[in-house]
Amino acid sequence: MLLERTISQLDLGPVSSTRANELGQLGYMQWLGWLPPMADYRMEAMRAYAAAQPFIRTSPAIAVFCDLLVASTRIPIEPLPLSLPARCGRGGARARRAAT
């Protein structure tokens, strides 16, 4: 169920490559955080890839998610290119007051 939720959150259709990278990385981290502590990582990664693979062509964010799953199972193990999205201000209190 949690895997399906991650996939549905990432299946936004066409987005910019920057946004796709941000979303795909966040989706991977979300999926990873939901894995049970004693889960077989390789098996879970293959299951997640199999579930997300049908959406690769229509959703760049899912393609990034799948690329991370594949990269995480390669040997030798290498660090993944994961980062949180850059913070962007939305105007704060001044913008909220101006909107009313």
Image: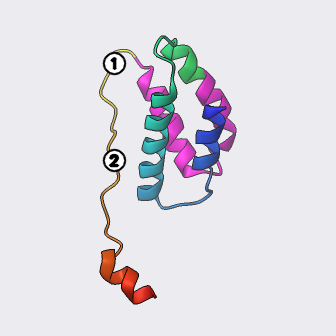
**Where does residue 52 sit, x and y in percent of width and height?**
63, 36
User: Magenta includes 59?
Assistant: yes
> Does 90 sit left or right of 43 as displayed?
left
Relative to 46, does residue 91 appear above or below in the rendering?
A: below
The majority secondary structure of the magenta stretch comes to: helix
The residue depicted at 44 percent of the width and 44 percent of the height is 26
User: Magenta includes 12?
Assistant: no
Q: Residues within 10 Å of mark 2 (few under 14, many from 20)?
A: few
How was this image coloured? rainbow
Q: Which mark is residue 16?
A: none
> Considering depth in this image, is 20 or 94 the residue closer to the camera?
94
Q: Toward which corner of the image does residue 14 lie, by quadrant?
A: bottom right
Quadrant placement of the N terminus:
top right
The segment highlighted magenta reads: 47-74
Element under label 1? loop
Q: Exactly how many numbered labels are in the figure? A: 2
The residue depicted at 59 percent of the width and 29 percent of the height is 49
**Where does residue 28 sit, x and y in percent of width and height?**
47, 36
The residue depicted at 32 percent of the width and 77 percent of the height is 93
Q: Which mark is residue 77?
A: 1
The residue depicted at 42 percent of the width and 25 percent of the height is 72
Which tag, 2 or 1, sits closer to the chain's start?
A: 1
Element under label 2? loop
* Residue hosting label 2: 84
Q: Nearer the viewer, mark 2 or mark 1?
A: 2
Q: Residues within 10 Å of mark 1 (few under 14, many from 20)?
A: few
> Considering depth in this image, is 35 or 81 the residue closer to the camera?
35
> Does 71 sit left or right of 61 as displayed?
left
